[in-house]
Amino acid sequence: GQQLNQSPQSMFIQEGEDVSMNCTSSSIFNTWLWYKQDPGEGPVLLIALYKAGELTSNGRLTAQFGITRKDSFLNISASIPSDVGIYFCAGFSNTGNQFYFGTGTSLTVIP
Amino acid sequence: NAGVMQNPRHLVRRRGQEARLRCSPMKGHSHVYWYRQLPEEGLKFMVYLQKENIIDESGMPKERFSAEFPKEGPSILRIQQVVRGDSAAYFCASSEQGGNEQFFGPGTRLTVL
């Protein structure tokens, strides 16, 4: 199946720093979703994007749907310890039936 | 509005037994997706169902695995004659429409002894 390239694979940052991660695909997507997963839990939806160029915020989180429709990024501003977790992107194409998930970015915030 | 429910949260089976995983979607959601996740890995799509229909099962192993989403009741992912390699976390997600945001359940962690 299709793979989304998500980077970086892991990040270690100081509390208060900003974070940026991105996903790229070889195919065009119509929807991008960003999730956070804590250990032992299911992924929690953070932001949903439906239009190319769309920039959407959710508190300290901001995500953008790339103009080419082949990429998306997620920014976290002023990180705090509870931001620790694994962040996944997911893309959906109207020509298919499924969301494809990225390989995840593991975020560690050092107090 | 209750979220996606999955049960059991943990399931232990011996090799050769059957595993039955249940998923109740969010109220008003008629689209259900099942995913499998191995430790330290991402989510792998298995199957997409709407009420009484399998829409896409391209991610499901051809043997031993089956899924259903009946008109009444939860969606069921069934694994027959489990093997050690089936040990994983299985997540269900639901959405109002295909291609819309999916909301995940807490997962079922299957351990095969």
Image (cartoon, coloured by chain):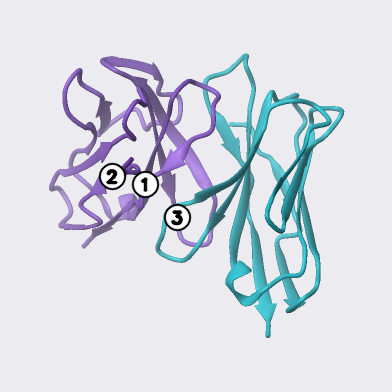
Q: Which residue is the site of mark 1?
A: B105
Q: Is residue A86 above or below residue B45?
A: below
Q: Secondary structure at mark 3?
A: loop
Q: Is residue B74 above or below residue A105?
A: above
Q: Colour of chain B?
A: purple
The spot of residue A12 in percent (x, y) is 73, 75
Q: Report in which chain the residue with disc 3 lies.
A: B
Classed neighbour count for the residue bearing mark 3: other residues with Cα under 10 Å, few (<14), some (14–19), many (≥20): some
Q: Are marks 1 and 3 on the same chain?
A: yes
Residue at position x 83%, y 31% from top? A53
B57 vs B112, left or right, is right
Residue at position x 27%, y 39% from top? B23
Q: Report in which chain the residue with disc 2 lies.
A: B
B71 vs A105, left or right, is left
Which kind of residue does numbered mark 3 sit on?
A: Leu
Q: Which residue is the site of mark 3?
A: B38
Chain letter, cyan in picture:
A
Residue at position x 68%, y 85% from top? A111
Q: Are marks 3 and 2 in contact (CB under 8 Å)?
A: no
